[in-house]
Image (spheres, rainbow, N blue to C red):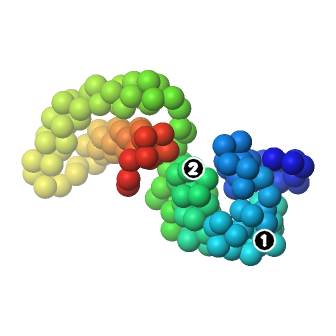
Amino acid sequence: MGKKATKAADNMYYLARSEAAEGNADFASREKTAEIIGIDRTRLARIELDTISPYPEEVKAMAEAYNTPELCNSYCARECPIGRNSVSEVTIDDFDRLALKVLGSLKDIDALRASLIAISEDGVIEENERPAFQKILDSLQKISNNANALRIWAMKNIRLKQ
């Protein structure tokens, strides 16, 4: 990319475009990028300068154009009013690290299954069962986050679909 936009230096959309520009010179300018993703150049500038939030369809267009599916996850976790309460932002590592995280989070799955069966036998979560149930929920969240990170890695690196 030509000039580095210092005001946008830590903006995830700017950083994604900068990374994409390394492999595709069309993304070096906001003008050409805006044309490719189908939004106004000044709107793209305002998004990259954090003066406005992008619409979900704009994030999706940027993620597809830049090959950065992690933008959608970050948008949902950080900016979407619904997602902020239900989506965890994931960190995309190298494949081997992600695979180990997934396997590590699954290592106690049999114990979790047995605990969930024991808790759910009577159809009621008793007060004394709540800590064990919370542990199950925390473990499931960890599994979900690791699986989501691996899925996003695959979408980015081997072009697997959602």
Q: How far across and down, in percent of the image, does residue 127 sit?
A: 28, 48
Quarter the C terminus occupies = bottom left
Question: Seen in the image, is 130 located left or right of residue 41?
Answer: left
Outermost residue toward the left in this view: 121
**Residue 141, label in figure:** none
**Residue 68, label in figure:** 2
Point 74% across, 75% down: residue:
40
Residue 66 can be seen, yes or no: yes
Q: Is residue 103 above or below residue 54?
A: above
Q: How far across and down, in percent of the image, does residue 38 sit?
A: 64, 73
Residue type highlighted by circle 2 = Thr
- The answer to whether the residue labelled 2 contacts the one labelled 1, judged by CB atoms less than 8 Å apart, is no
> How many residues crowd around disc 1 within 10 Å: few (fewer than 14), some, or many (20 or more)?
some
Circle 1 residue: 41
Question: Seen in the image, is 70 located left or right of residue 109?
Answer: right
Point 57% across, 50% down: residue:
68
**Picture quadrant where residue 80 is located:** bottom right
Point 63% across, 67% down: residue:
37
> What is the count of numbered marks?
2
- Please tell me whether mark 2 sits on a helix, a strand or a loop: loop
- Please tell me whether mark 1 sits on a helix, a strand or a loop: helix
